[in-house]
Image (cartoon, rainbow, N blue to C red):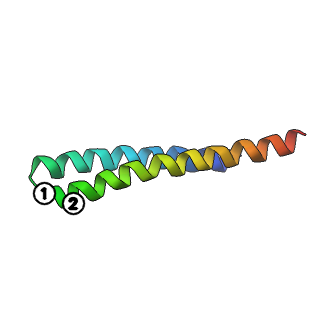
């Protein structure tokens, strides 16, 4: 379970980085790269949610 939570936290960190990178690219007028970073910024939290769900499922199974 701890590993899944760690992976979820890493996904959130990656999302934050992608948001910052997207903002920097948009500011420079590089909208194509900014768009790609924005897409990644949305994908990472989805993965984090999946990892968290896995951790809770595993935890619930161990506690039954």
Q: Are marks 2 and 1 in contact (CB under 8 Å)?
A: yes
| 23 sits to left or right of 48 | left
Task: Tell me how far mark 2 sits from mark 1, CA to CA.
Answer: 6 Å
Q: Position of residue 1 (x, y in %)?
A: 71, 46
Q: Quadrant of the C terminus?
A: top right
Residue at image x 27%, y 44%?
A: 20
Residue sitting at the far right: 64
Q: Position of residue 5 (x, y in %)?
A: 62, 44
- Label 1 CA crowd tier, 10 Å (few <14, some 14–19, many 20+): few
Residue at image x 18%, y 48%?
A: 24
Q: Which mark is residue 30?
A: 1
Residue sitting at the far left: 29
Q: Circle 1 — which element?
A: loop
Residue at image x 54%, y 47%?
A: 48
| 61 sits to left or right of 19 | right
Q: Circle 2 — which element?
A: helix
**Numbered label tally:** 2
Determine which residue is flagged by label 2. 33
Q: Above or below — where is 29 with respect to 53? A: below
Between 59 and 46, the one nearer to me in the picture? 46
Q: Position of residue 3 (x, y in %)?
A: 65, 50
Residue at image x 81%, y 40%?
A: 60
Q: Above or below — where is 61 with respect to 35? A: above
Q: Which mark is residue 51?
A: none
- Label 2 CA crowd tier, 10 Å (few <14, some 14–19, many 20+): some
Between 47 and 2, the one nearer to me in the picture? 47
Q: Position of residue 49 (x, y in %)?
A: 56, 44
| 23 sits to left or right of 7 | left
């Amino acid at each position: 379970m701890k590993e899944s939570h760690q992976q979820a936290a890493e996904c959130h960190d990656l999302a934050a980085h992608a948001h910052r990178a997207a903002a920097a690219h948009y500011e420079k007028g590089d909208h194509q790269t900014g768009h790609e970073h924005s897409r990644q910024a949305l994908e990472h939290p989805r993965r984090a949610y999946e990892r968290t769900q896995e951790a809770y499922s595993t935890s619930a199974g161990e506690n039954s």
